[in-house]
Image: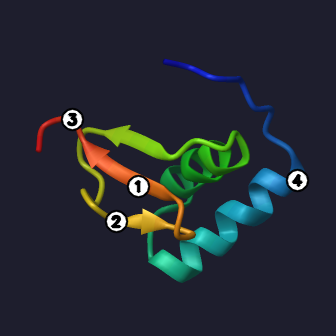
Amino acid sequence: QVSSIEPVLEETHDLAREIVFRYRLGFYDSALLASALLADCDTFYSEDMHHGLVIEERLAMRNACA
Protein backbone atom coordinates (compact mmCIF):
# COMPACT_ATOMS: atom_id res chain seq x y z
CA GLN A 1 0.00 0.00 0.00
CA VAL A 2 1.40 3.40 -1.00
CA SER A 3 1.23 5.93 1.80
CA SER A 4 2.50 8.94 -0.12
CA ILE A 5 4.41 10.09 -3.16
CA GLU A 6 7.66 11.85 -2.39
CA PRO A 7 9.23 14.36 -4.77
CA VAL A 8 12.94 14.01 -5.48
CA LEU A 9 14.43 16.97 -3.68
CA GLU A 10 17.95 17.94 -2.68
CA GLU A 11 17.25 16.28 0.70
CA THR A 12 16.46 13.01 -1.10
CA HIS A 13 19.68 13.22 -3.10
CA ASP A 14 21.80 14.00 -0.03
CA LEU A 15 20.29 11.15 1.98
CA ALA A 16 20.80 8.80 -0.97
CA ARG A 17 24.50 9.71 -1.06
CA GLU A 18 24.80 8.99 2.67
CA ILE A 19 23.18 5.58 2.14
CA VAL A 20 25.58 4.83 -0.75
CA PHE A 21 28.62 5.40 1.46
CA ARG A 22 27.24 3.91 4.68
CA TYR A 23 25.72 0.73 3.24
CA ARG A 24 27.76 0.28 0.02
CA LEU A 25 24.67 0.25 -2.22
CA GLY A 26 24.24 1.68 -5.70
CA PHE A 27 23.00 5.24 -6.07
CA TYR A 28 19.65 4.44 -7.70
CA ASP A 29 18.79 1.82 -5.07
CA SER A 30 19.86 4.31 -2.41
CA ALA A 31 17.63 7.00 -3.93
CA LEU A 32 14.64 4.67 -3.66
CA LEU A 33 15.54 3.88 -0.05
CA ALA A 34 16.00 7.58 0.76
CA SER A 35 12.55 8.30 -0.64
CA ALA A 36 11.08 5.52 1.49
CA LEU A 37 12.79 6.89 4.60
CA LEU A 38 11.52 10.41 3.92
CA ALA A 39 8.01 8.99 3.49
CA ASP A 40 8.33 7.34 6.94
CA CYS A 41 8.03 3.81 5.53
CA ASP A 42 9.14 0.96 7.76
CA THR A 43 9.39 -1.79 5.10
CA PHE A 44 10.90 -1.68 1.61
CA TYR A 45 9.96 -4.55 -0.71
CA SER A 46 12.37 -5.56 -3.47
CA GLU A 47 13.17 -8.48 -5.74
CA ASP A 48 16.92 -8.61 -5.31
CA MET A 49 18.22 -6.27 -2.63
CA HIS A 50 19.77 -7.26 0.70
CA HIS A 51 16.94 -9.12 2.45
CA GLY A 52 16.91 -8.34 6.17
CA LEU A 53 19.13 -5.26 5.99
CA VAL A 54 17.80 -2.41 8.12
CA ILE A 55 18.57 1.10 6.90
CA GLU A 56 18.97 3.87 9.49
CA GLU A 57 17.60 1.52 12.18
CA ARG A 58 14.04 1.91 10.88
CA LEU A 59 13.60 0.74 7.26
CA ALA A 60 13.67 -3.05 6.85
CA MET A 61 14.41 -4.45 3.41
CA ARG A 62 12.38 -7.48 2.36
CA ASN A 63 12.78 -9.48 -0.83
CA ALA A 64 9.49 -10.61 -2.26
CA CYS A 65 11.21 -13.76 -3.52
CA ALA A 66 12.82 -14.66 -0.16
Q: Earlier in the sequence, mark 2 or mark 1?
A: 2
Residue 56 found in image quarter: bottom right
Q: Residue at x 51, y 46 (%)?
A: 42
The residue that disc 3 covers is 64
Alpha carbon separation for disc pair 3 and 4: 30 Å
Q: Residue at x 42, y 65 (%)?
A: 54
Circle 4: element type:
helix
Q: Amino acid at mark 2?
A: Leu
The residue that disc 4 covers is 10
The residue that disc 2 covers is 53
Q: Residue furthest left?
A: 66
The picture places residue 36, in percent across and down from the top left corner, at: 60, 43
In this image, 11 relative to 15: left or right? right
Label 4 crowd bin: few (<14), some (14–19), many (20+), radius 10 Å: few
Label 1 crowd bin: few (<14), some (14–19), many (20+), radius 10 Å: some
Q: Earlier in the sequence, mark 3 or mark 4?
A: 4
The residue that disc 1 covers is 60
Quick check: 19 above or below 40?
A: below
Labels 1 and 4 touching (C-beta < 8 A) = no
Circle 3: element type:
loop
Q: Amino acid at mark 4?
A: Glu
Quick check: 62 above or below 64?
A: below
Label 3 crowd bin: few (<14), some (14–19), many (20+), radius 10 Å: few
> The C terminus lies in which quarter of the figure?
top left
Alpha carbon separation for disc pair 2 and 1: 6 Å
Label 1 or label 4, whichever lies nearer to me, is: 1
Labels 2 and 1 touching (C-beta < 8 A) = yes
In this image, 48 relative to 56: left or right? left
Label 4 or label 2, whichever lies nearer to me, is: 2
Q: Amino acid at mark 1?
A: Ala
